[in-house]
Amino acid sequence: MSDNVIRLPRPANARPEPGKLGLYLRPGHSQHKDMLEALAGGKKDFSGIIVEAGNVERRHHELVSHAHHIGLDVILDPKTQAMATPGGFTDSMAQLPWGSDRPHSVDDFNGEAGRQIAYKIAEFAKVHNCTEILGPTHLLNGPNDRWLRRDIETMGHLRSALDEEDSATQLIYPLTVSMQVLRDPLQRDALIAALADAPMDALWLKIDNFGSDASGEKTVSYIQAVRAFHTLGKPIVADHVGGLSGLGLLSFGAVGGIAQGLTMLEKFTANRWKRPRTEGRQSGSMPTRVYLPHVDLLLKPAEAEAFVSSSTRTRTRFGCRDTHCCPGGMRDMIENPTRHFIHQRCQEVSEISLRPEGLRVSEYLDKSVRPVSDHVAAAVGLGAIPDELKKKLQKKQKHMGGFREAVAHLAEVDASPSQAFAPPSRREREAAR
């Protein structure tokens, strides 16, 4: 029985060579055209795309086809987490084969009903040639939540459905809990014990109130807490995480990959799901923003242009000079923010992958954290930038002071930590079959 097996992290000298770290991108409702354009002429050095079930057949059909053509994973998000909340549920979700005219309840997944939902998701993934599935799990309030055992049962039904089809589709277990639960050793260990029997090829963590703007203290807590999940022996991906925090999780070996949106969805907050949807509340994607890697910020295009073009000094220091994504310099950075973002984020993750494990932390501190801290301090001292942006930069400067101190301290006291498995790419899995 797996309950009697204790999986210990392998010592450093017994680990294989580090694999390529995972990067998964989630295009928003209206970002498929921008992403197609970016893929046609830009860098494709990432692992796959995550597509919401409601977008697969129509809006994102061409993007999915192109992703298959260039060998990316196509990951189906069945939206079961949002579908079971008053604020996340939308009328369009009722049109999905496993949808309902109201938010799901835990009883909707009992017995044969749960098996039918799993089989419908498996059939949908097969029809649309998805290579991976985010399993039908739900937002948990802790290890005693009724959803946990029901989710594990439904994951079992989904695995059975895939096995019956002799499918090579990978099954991902999305675990979504609060930062408070993740920090609590008792609750965390109870979750890990329950997941030891859960069918999965990888574990994706979506942590409420954690993301790219996380403080140094919270990022360190995440790193230390997630290492406990290494005992499951599965690749671990941090979902809805980006920026310096996400790069830090990779560099410290807490996770083997990150997943995020295109200049958005770099943080998860469950409050929006928990609140009943009001009549005037909108649910569309937010506009694509411009990524400024030197200061680790995402700004509205007009705001980014005002900042970078405020002087020759700012244009030289903060404008993109990478001709792979922005051959036209600042103009391309502002007018093609998706291409710019994809290339820059791919490059950041790839650079970490190429570093030996023993050097990743020091290189992260020296080549990511310290330069951002210095650039932000320099930007705050500029006189030509708008007052509203100066306030953002001042807030970022204060944030960076604590962040830099916290991760530097972790680097000093960390001793031979375990390393998360990197998720194998689609090409690696197909070559192994």
Image (cartoon, grey):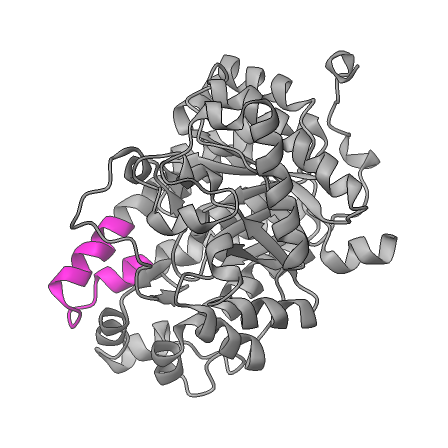
User: Residue at the spot x=47%, y=86% of the render?
Assistant: 327
Magenta: predominant secondary structure element?
helix
Q: Is residue 374 above or below residue 207?
A: below
Q: Position of residue 255 (x, y in %)?
A: 60, 41
Is residue 361 among what the camera can see?
no
Instruction: Please tell me which residue lies in front, 13 or 173.
Output: 173
Q: Position of residue 151 (x, y in %)?
A: 56, 27
Using the rendered image of the protein, determine whether residue 261 is visible from the camera's viewpoint. yes
Left or right of 183? Residue 102 is left
The residue positioned 62% from the left and 19% from the top of the image is 194
> Measuring 48% from the left and 28% from the top, which residue is drawn there?
108
Whether residue 163 is situated above or below residue 110 in the rendered picture: below
In this rendered view, identify the residue nearer to me: 217 or 274: 274
Which image quadrant: the N terminus?
A: top right
Count of numbered labels shown in the rendering: 0
Magenta-colored span: 376-396
- Residue sticking out furthest to the bottom: 328
x%, y% of residue 87?
30, 39
